[in-house]
Image (cartoon, coloured by chain):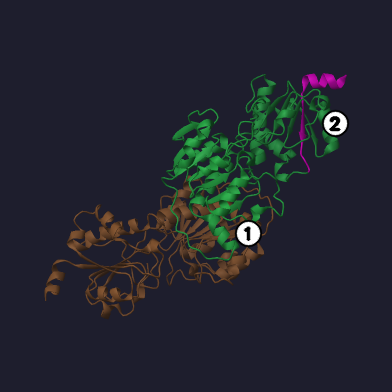
Chain colours: A brown, B green
Amino acid sequence: MAKAKGRAVKPTLHINNDPGEATVFHISQAQLQAASRKHKGLLQRINVTWSNGAQGYEAGLRDADILLASHFDAKDLARRAPGLKWVQVTSAGVEKLAPLIPPGVLLTNASGVHSPKGGEFAMTGVLMLSHGIPRFATGKEQGRWEQNFTTGVEGKTVVIVGVGAIGGEVARLAKRFAMKVIGVSRSGAANRHVDRMVKQRDLAKVLPLADFLVGALPLTVETRGLIGRAELDLLPRHCGIVNAGRSGVIDYEAMREKLELGTLAGAVLDVFDNEPLPPDSPWWKTPNTIITAHSAVDDGVRYIPRCLDIFFDNLGRHLSGRKLRNIVDLTIGY
Amino acid sequence: MAKAKGRAVKPTLHINNDPGEATVFHISQAQLQAASRKHKGLLQRINVTWSNGAQGYEAGLRDADILLASHFDAKDLARRAPGLKWVQVTSAGVEKLAPLIPPGVLLTNASGVHSPKGGEFAMTGVLMLSHGIPRFATGKEQGRWEQNFTTGVEGKTVVIVGVGAIGGEVARLAKRFAMKVIGVSRSGAANRHVDRMVKQRDLAKVLPLADFLVGALPLTVETRGLIGRAELDLLPRHCGIVNAGRSGVIDYEAMREKLELGTLAGAVLDVFDNEPLPPDSPWWKTPNTIITAHSAVDDGVRYIPRCLDIFFDNLGRHLSGRKLRNIVDLTIGY
């Protein structure tokens, strides 16, 4: 019973790197050591096991008190990981994972990790739309020199749907460019960088005011299909859309039709219903659209270090019995 | 001699709108009236004549003391406009016009008019390069889903070649994003938003440090060919280029080769040697490149109002014998 005794003293952390995922999402020994230096003494208080594939993963689950991973097979977790108390994921969106978490296991996500890059990306998208970049890109696709004298973002209105970590950062940057910022959120709670905040049920009131619409929502039962055809029809023709959240929030087919018809000025889209977009997807030929291949919010350099910062902060809390940060409310899904 | 007498009292301003140019560059009666309200009493002190084509233009020149125009035929101006004292142009680059200005005639340009939009455009270009947008645009052209996890601009270095009105505005915005800003200018004079300023002759020392290179130079005898093949070879492979100045400053063929080879990460180019780019130009198929069709610095809404602000300010100075703003030094060409 040496093992049971050991576990009582030192909890076991299992780290799983999914070999099917881009290496930018993999956690290395060196990164773990580097992050632990900012949180002294914590790494010594746990055992760490690693897996890089199915087999090591199964054994790792069996003994794990804590699981740290990006994507992983979470089927029947209660049986496969009987000692599991806490799962820290290195993603923010957990719509597929949340329903699989067994009762009594805490799920924490990496919400906030994406906000510096995601907010900067979405603001870049707003600037691009204001400067007509998606349209110029289509001009290049078609070998067509067409001048388009736009104007800057100052005084224009951005409607940010979802004022969480990324949406809040977009708001902050937009105010620096002297834009008008309208926020739409579940709670309608005030944010210092948002000029006017409304609840999701009042979305229709603010859509006609949008020069730009930024989608930064997680996919939940409440947000799925939130921006449907009727809502898109409320946007002015000159409006452009940036989506750095989840595609299921917006009716993509209706949006694509509007881009084809020119009743929407442009789009900068990071996410799609079917990823990777298949070669025969009509999106490849849709005009005035920039496609960023679900890369926009993940920072190739700072991503894992930021995730590990959250993990170690939470580990300190876990070991001393305090409340963790970024706990996912499994009833609402974020 | 009523005419001569009238001219002694009220100088004649001739305004020429070139019918061959985009209407965004045309000055309307309404715009002139609107601008004059901010500069009370000045419009009453001059006669105004207008032309919208060759014939009215010739007669207008004959009686003009002051000429206000964008592009215009300036050949043999001394003979055609014997009373001309001052030409205010609504463009910033005057490399073609400057040599045609007769001795004794003042040329003032619209330098500064482009800086709000031009600076914002160039900063947008830097952000786009940092977020891999030119590369994603090429992915879309080719129907290829390729993830590219970049990182934000914080802490990265932008080298701004030409720290005038536009370059200075880029520097200001870049500092807001916590970038390192290196400036290259003719004088090497300090700028509060530039961390390190060097003279043009020291360009080679700073090129290897550039994560981004922003070209914002006028075309003069001193700047033509400044960034040739040897200079481009000094840039790191991951560097991207934004050119919002004049194309003659950079060796475009060498730049294009580097983009094809992948030894330059991307480019956001507003200006080209032959505009409009011909349909068979290799630039249409050059990867990792955004082409903005010489529209980037001209503000479709605020352009002419800003030009007229400069004009009326200068008119007040002219009528009271004070020194004008934005006088072009004809010996250096800007």
Quadrant where the C terminus of chain A is found in the figure: bottom left
Q: Residues within 10 Å of mark 1 (few under 14, many from 20)?
A: some
Element under label 1?
loop
User: Which residue, given by chain and number where applicable, does mark 2 sit on?
Assistant: B59
User: Which residue, given by chain and number where applicable, does mark 1 sit on?
Assistant: A237
Tell which subunit mark 1 falls on.
A
Vertical placement of residue A191 versus B3, above or below: below
Residue visible at 54% across and 46% down? B241
Q: Is residue B43 visible?
A: no
Between residues B97 and B233, which one lies in front from this camera angle? B233
- Residue A152 in the image, given as x and y percentages of width and height: 58, 46
Range of magenta residues: B1-19
Is residue B11 magenta-colored?
Answer: yes
Quadrant of residue B75 in the image? top right
Tell which subunit mark 2 falls on.
B
Query: Which label number is shown at residue A11?
Result: none
Q: Are marks 1 and 2 on the same chain?
A: no
Vertical placement of residue A60 versus B135, above or below: below
Residue type at mark 2: give it: Ala
Residue type at mark 1: give it: Arg
Is residue B294 magenta-colored?
Answer: no
- Residue B287 in the image, given as x and y percentages of width and height: 58, 56
